[in-house]
Amino acid sequence: MNTSTPSEYLVLSRGQWDADKSPEEIQQAIDAFYVWHDELVAQGRMKSGQRLARDARLVSRAGVLDGPFTEAKEVVGGYWFFIAHSLDEACALAAQNPCMACGLQYEVRPVEPVRASAWVPSSETPGTVTLRIRRDDLRGPEIQALLEEHLQHMRAVSPPESVHALDLDKLRQPAITFWTVWSGASLAGCGALKQINPQHGEIKSMRTAQAHRRAGVARAMLAHIIEEARRRGYTRLSLETGSQDAFEPARQLYARFGFVPCPPFEGYTDDPNSVFMCRQM
């Protein structure tokens, strides 16, 4: 039994009825579809969408064009949402649609839970991806130097009792997954996810290298961590950051991703030098 938190998947109904199908055969498939649809909605495995009218227009810098755009195979008849634990599970549900027997096809896509970023790969990203995120074993000299810079900065802006950044040994504990962000061959930043319990994770060691500031590195890393937390089925994601002015950009970034202030958690205590934030997943 899958105990992870399910996600939403958008389903687009594409194509047209087979030319050799009679109206009676098509209506039989439509009637079977609504029975199937209502059963899945009742089970909490589908969210209703809508049929789409044939009238359509494409709006772009070139102007407004009339549709539908059959020559581009862009006929979309409707949409709805599956509630599933994986893309494979959502596709398996789509394959049960009775209307497939009469020629329709279904595009299934995960719903992205975070805001768009120009530095995170997406459907709109052209060409080569600028930033690359990979899991790291913390053995390379580049990441060791960046983490030392991170610790030195934390100690410079916070009193010793308020420094919660982790050193190399603590970051290697099994409950922590660590990633680095690369721009070509250059280390651009890092971040980590600590599992507090099967439903709760904590963001740790978010750092951008000085040469890559204001290039979207932190946004890309944070989006990656949020997606990993969602994949693991966490219901809450928390973090601790500083209250000083030096941490204001970080607090603003977290707020843009849906994090809100919260009380201390998992061993932390009230500290005027700390701000605690969390996001419900």
Image: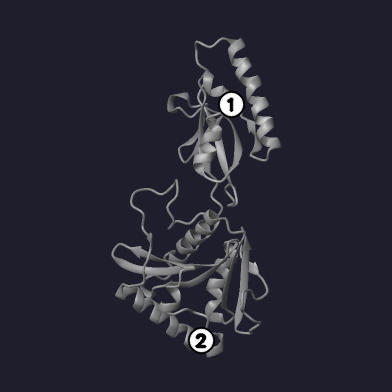
Q: Which mark is residue 55?
A: 1
Question: Which quarter of the rendering shows the C terminus?
Answer: bottom right
Which comes sooner in the sequence, label 2 or label 1? Answer: 1
Q: Where 248 sits versus 104, above or below?
A: below
- Can the viewer see residue 159 in this picture? no
Mark 1 closeness class: few <14, some 14–19, many ≥20 residues within 10 Å: few
Amino acid of disc 1:
Asp
What residue lies at 56% left-to-right and 36% top-to-bottom? Answer: 11
Residue on which the image places disc 2 = 157
**Residue 196 falls in which quadrant of the image?**
bottom right
Q: Is residue 16 above or below residue 59?
A: above
Q: Which residue does the image show at 53% across and 40% down from the upper left?
A: 89
Rendering coords of residue 97 (x, y %): 57, 27
The residue that appears at 34% across and 78% down in the rendered structure is: 145
Q: Residue furthest left?
A: 185
Instruction: Give the farthest residue toward the right.
Output: 42
Give the x, y percent position of residue 10. Answer: 56, 40
Q: CA distance from mark 2 to mark 1?
A: 60 Å
Could you tell me residue 54's position as x and y percent? 58, 25
Amino acid type, mark 2: Val
